[in-house]
């Protein structure tokens, strides 16, 4: 189990000189930090984030936030003095301690106009990591290079999924976004060594291609060109897929921001009608563009079809005229049922069904001769007769050319005009909103509209790029399939080296095995996270008959289903969303193989009634095998919670401010 042993603050915001320790005092690894709102609870969490990542993620407005340096420490110094800011996080992992310490130096300056002391950072924050055995502080290793320190941070608290280690219970709105889901997937695969399998697979594939080249190096230049193109296509496909992976994350974020801006505009009464009209026009434009795309596809098919028809028209016309001529002049034998003739030859006791005459020996000889003639001529006759209908349809189709062309051109013109008129009206609305001015306005309509326009342009560009990428991938994969077949054919014909053949087979088999193991591991990881999330979620929620199951898709986005198997993820209450977030977080910890601590700000802030007890008890149960640090306000730490988390079970530390509210006065029981 990985545990936070202590956190030491020096001049970090209101934490001037504070050390919090987290020694276990029971069978539970549960630690409570209580503080009033505004006392420094979230600052405590941000201090850890600053130490590890040089970021404070839980600040509402970073642009307007104060510097990290403690204000009273600056006022106590003279002009030119320096103040050191540091946060040191010490953790234990099996037989060793690791201390992550970030420092930054500030210089004290004096404002010449106001004579107020201020601070200026003299350097960028730096991170140092100390690693030492638990037995004694000897043989300590010091890591100071960015590459080494970031490797250790990623190993224990991967920045990509920081919110799954340092959890903010009041900030759940982005928790299940596709962006976060993608980061979870990437991080889990990295921690589970799936990426190593991907790298190994790529390496063996490259080596196999090298052997291919070596086998055909004495052949003509065409062989080399094919292998060069294969390598180039594979690189292009990989780059395009990576680009689309990034676009898969970026596009929903842009759309979400556009939706937020739209909500702001539609919520402001003076411009509400404009926004409602724009949403109607946007919907209309999307439908028009969809229908236009379908029409353009029909136009392409129209051009392709008539190009072929007109190109072949002289031959079609000549063939049809020849068939009609032969029919008119009796040069085609009549259609005769051979089976009926054969039946008459074998059963000639009855009269002929055509003329009612007697079927004698002379008639039988005649019918046999007719069968021989039919064997020779009926095949050609039947073929010509069978294609006649198709040729006539082709001629008829050519006669319809002008009507179809006129219809398509009219539709093309219609869609173009409708789209232009719709876009024109949209531009008028956008122009109006972007220059909107009202001294009594509650919101800055002009600023919101300008941002919305910018985001919409970005979304359009990225969406088009994604579509172009998908088309390029499809075309490249089709070309790659053709080249692979050609390469294999060349290898069959070439005078191949048997040793190289065996080597290439081994490398291809290895690539296949790596890919197979990778897929199995990815599937197992996803199923494991899914099951662990569901089991914890069930225990945290008091509703036992509402929820049926939970699924995680290939992109690691979750869906929760009710007993009617309807997806109700978007309809979860705040309490249920928090329970789901906790469950997913804990499942990630367990599956990653790193039993890291969980630090939670406002752990039960959105929870009430029976759910509060269920969730508190479940976290207590989990703390038997995982360290959990919970940051409560006084209101959150209610009587019912205190009954569960009493001082015999959890360590409890209270945070309070000095009278001037400039720094933390103490940390204690």
Image (cartoon, rainbow, N blue to C red):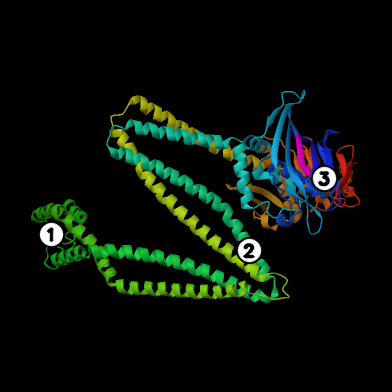
Write down the quadrant of residue 184 in the picture: top right
Q: Specify the label residue 15 is tagged with.
A: 3
The boundaries of the magenta stretch are 81-90
User: Disc 3 to disc 1, how far (Cα)?
Assistant: 123 Å
Q: Nearer the viewer, mark 3 or mark 2?
A: 3
Q: Identify the residue position indicated by label 1 in the image.
A: 358
Left or right? Give the position of 477 relative to 113: left
Q: Nearer the viewer, mark 1 or mark 2?
A: 2
Give whichever of discs 3 and 1 has the lower sequence position. 3
Circles 3 and 2: CB atoms closer than 8 Å: no
Q: Where is residue 629 in the image (x, y as percent from the top left)?
A: 79, 41
The residue under the point 21% across, 57% down is 383
Q: Where is residue 110 in the image (x, y as percent from the top left)?
A: 79, 53
Q: Position of residue 641 (x, y in %)?
A: 86, 47
Q: Nearer the viewer, mark 3 or mark 1?
A: 3
Within-10-Å neighbours for mark 2: few <14, some 14–19, many 20+: few
Left or right? Give the position of 279 relative to 28: left
């Amino acid at each position: 189990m990985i545990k936070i042993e202590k956190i030491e603050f020096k001049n970090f915001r209101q934490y001037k000189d504070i050390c919090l320790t987290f020694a276990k005092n029971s069978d539970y690894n549960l630690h409570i930090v209580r503080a009033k709102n505004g006392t420094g609870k979230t600052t405590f969490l941000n201090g850890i984030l600053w130490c590890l990542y040089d970021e404070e993620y839980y600040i509402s407005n970073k642009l307007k936030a104060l510097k990290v340096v403690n204000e009273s420490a600056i006022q106590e110094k003279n002009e030119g003095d320096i103040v050191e800011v540091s946060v040191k996080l010490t953790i234990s992992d099996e037989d060793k301690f690791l201390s992550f310490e970030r420092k930054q130096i500030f210089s004290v300056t004096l404002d010449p106009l106001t004579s107020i002391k201020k601070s200026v950072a003299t350097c960028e924050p730096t991170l140092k990591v100390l690693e030492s055995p638990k037995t004694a502080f000897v043989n300590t290793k010091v890591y100071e290079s960015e590459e080494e320190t970031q490797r250790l941070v990623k190993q224990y608290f991967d920045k990509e999924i920081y919110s799954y280690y340092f959890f903010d219970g009041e900030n759940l709105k982005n928790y299940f976004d596709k962006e976060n889901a993608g980061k979870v997937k990437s991080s889990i695969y990295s921690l589970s060594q799936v990426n190593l399998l991907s790298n190994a697979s790529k390496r063996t594939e490259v080596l196999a291609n090298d052997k291919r080249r070596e086998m055909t190096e004495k052949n003509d230049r065409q062989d080399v060109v094919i292998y060069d193109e294969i390598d180039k296509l594979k690189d292009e496909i990989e780059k395009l897929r990576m680009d689309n992976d990034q676009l898969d994350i970026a596009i929903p974020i842009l759309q979400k921001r556009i939706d937020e801006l739209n909500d702001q505009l539609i919520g402001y009464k003076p411009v509400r009608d404009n926004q409602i009209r724009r949403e109607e026009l946007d919907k209309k434009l999307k439908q028009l563009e969809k229908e236009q795309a379908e029409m353009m596809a029909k136009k392409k098919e129209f051009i392709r079809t008539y190009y072929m028809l007109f190109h072949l028209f002289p031959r079609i016309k000549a063939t049809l005229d020849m068939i009609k001529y032969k029919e008119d002049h009796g040069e085609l034998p009549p259609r005769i049922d051979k089976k009926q003739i054969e039946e008459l030859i074998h059963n000639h006791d009855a009269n002929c069904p055509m003329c009612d005459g007697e079927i004698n020996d002379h008639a039988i000889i005649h019918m046999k001769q007719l069968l021989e003639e039919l064997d020779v001529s009926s095949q050609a006759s039947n073929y010509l007769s069978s294609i006649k209908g198709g040729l006539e349809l082709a001629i008829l189709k050519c006669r319809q050319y002008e009507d179809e062309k006129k219809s398509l051109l009219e539709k093309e013109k219609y869609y173009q005009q409708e789209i232009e008129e719709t876009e024109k009206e949209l531009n008028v609305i956008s122009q109006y909103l972007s220059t909107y001015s009202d001294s009594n306005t509650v919101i800055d309509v002009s600023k919101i509209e300008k941002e919305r326009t910018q985001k919409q342009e970005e979304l359009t560009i990225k969406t088009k790029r994604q579509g172009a990428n998908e088309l390029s991938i499809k075309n490249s994969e089709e070309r790659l399939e053709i080249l692979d077949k050609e390469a294999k054919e060349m290898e069959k014909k070439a005078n191949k080296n048997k040793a190289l053949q065996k080597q290439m087979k081994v490398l291809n088999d290895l690539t296949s095995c790596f890919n197979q193991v990778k897929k199995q591991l990815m599937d197992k990881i996803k199923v494991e996270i899914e099951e662990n999330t569901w089991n914890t979620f069930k225990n945290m929620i008091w509703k036992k008959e509402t929820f049926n199951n939970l699924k995680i898709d290939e992109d690691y986005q979750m869906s929760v289903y009710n007993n009617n198997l309807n997806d109700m993820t978007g309809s979860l209450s705040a309490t249920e969303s928090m329970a789901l977030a906790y469950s997913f977080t804990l499942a990630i910890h367990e599956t990653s193989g790193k039993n890291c601590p969980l630090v939670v700000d406002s752990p039960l802030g959105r929870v009430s009634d029976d759910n509060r007890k269920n969730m508190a008890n479940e976290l207590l149960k989990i703390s038997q095998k995982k360290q959990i640090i919970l940051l409560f306000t006084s209101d959150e730490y209610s009587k019912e919670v205190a009954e569960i988390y009493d001082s015999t079970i959890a360590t409890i530390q209270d945070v309070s401010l000095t009278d001037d509210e400039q720094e933390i006065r103490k940390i204690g029981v």
